[in-house]
Amino acid sequence: ADVAAGKAKAATCSGCHGSNGIGIMDTYPNLAGQKAAYIAKQLKAFKSGQRADPIMGSMAKPLSDADIANIAAYYASLK
Amino acid sequence: ADVAAGKAKAATCSGCHGSNGIGIMDTYPNLAGQKAAYIAKQLKAFKSGQRADPIMGSMAKPLSDADIANIAAYYASLK
């Protein structure tokens, strides 16, 4: 996975999950240091609708598998 | 919320999420330092079935609202 590409793609995510991976509201999870495989699994579940969330569903829909792997690697790399 | 009660109740959770809140496998999320409101929201979603997961569904089902608040506060308190 490409952390730099993930960081670029995660610009949209940072609106809620923070520029440092710390959620800006109490119901927005921290992603910094989270396990990449877990993040990727959840993004795929949001994309498919298996995990239902109006915001994350529309965020995840346009992501390719490579985007997902890169974004997950980027957040996992943050401390 | 009662962090000590949450810690006691979280003994079961630690089988997968670690005794320090760090998931023992790549697909088990870290919970240490996660936002309490987010953890509580997810536990309620697992309990109701709104968020579907075979393991977490059965784990969350017996939890009271107080248990959920205490467990969420406990994991949020970990670093």
Image: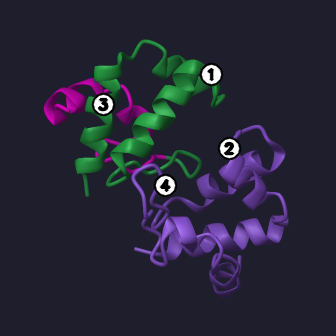
Chain colours: A purple, B green
Q: Comparing marks 4 and 1, which lies closer to the viewer?
A: 4
Check disc 4: other Cα within 10 Å, few if <14, some if 14-19, many if 20+: some
Residue that carries the numbered disc 1 in the rendered image: B49
Q: Is residue A69 visible?
A: yes
Front position in the image: A77 or A27 = A27
Q: Which chain is disc 2 placed on? A: A
- For label 2, the SS is loop
Q: CA distance from mark 3 to mark 2?
A: 22 Å
Instruction: Say which residue appears at 47% left-offset and 70% top-offset.
Output: A21
Q: Which range of residues does the magenta coloring cover? A: B1-24
**Labels 1 and 2 positioned on one and the same chain:** no
Determine if residue A41 is in view: no
Label 2 belongs to which residue? A53
Label 4 – label 3 distance at C-alpha: 17 Å
Residue B16 vs residue B40, the one in the foreground: B40
> How far separated are the C-alphas under marks 1 and 2?
13 Å
Contact between labelled residues 3 and 1, with CB atoms less than 8 Å apart: no
Give how far across and how far down residue B7 sits, in percent. 22, 33
Q: How far apart in space, not on screen, are marks 1 and 3 (Cα)?
A: 18 Å
**Residue A22 x %, y %:** 42, 67
Which amino acid type corresponds to the residue marked 3 in the rendered image?
Answer: Ala
Which residue has dot 3 on it? B69
Instruction: Give the class, few, some or many, for how many residues have Cα within 10 Å of label 1's Cα (few <14, many ≥20).
Output: some
- The residue type indicated by label 4 comes to Tyr
Above or below, comparing residue A49 to residue A68 in the picture? above
| Magenta-span inclusion, residue B2 | yes
Q: Quadrant of residue B16?
A: top left
Q: Which mark is residue A28?
A: 4
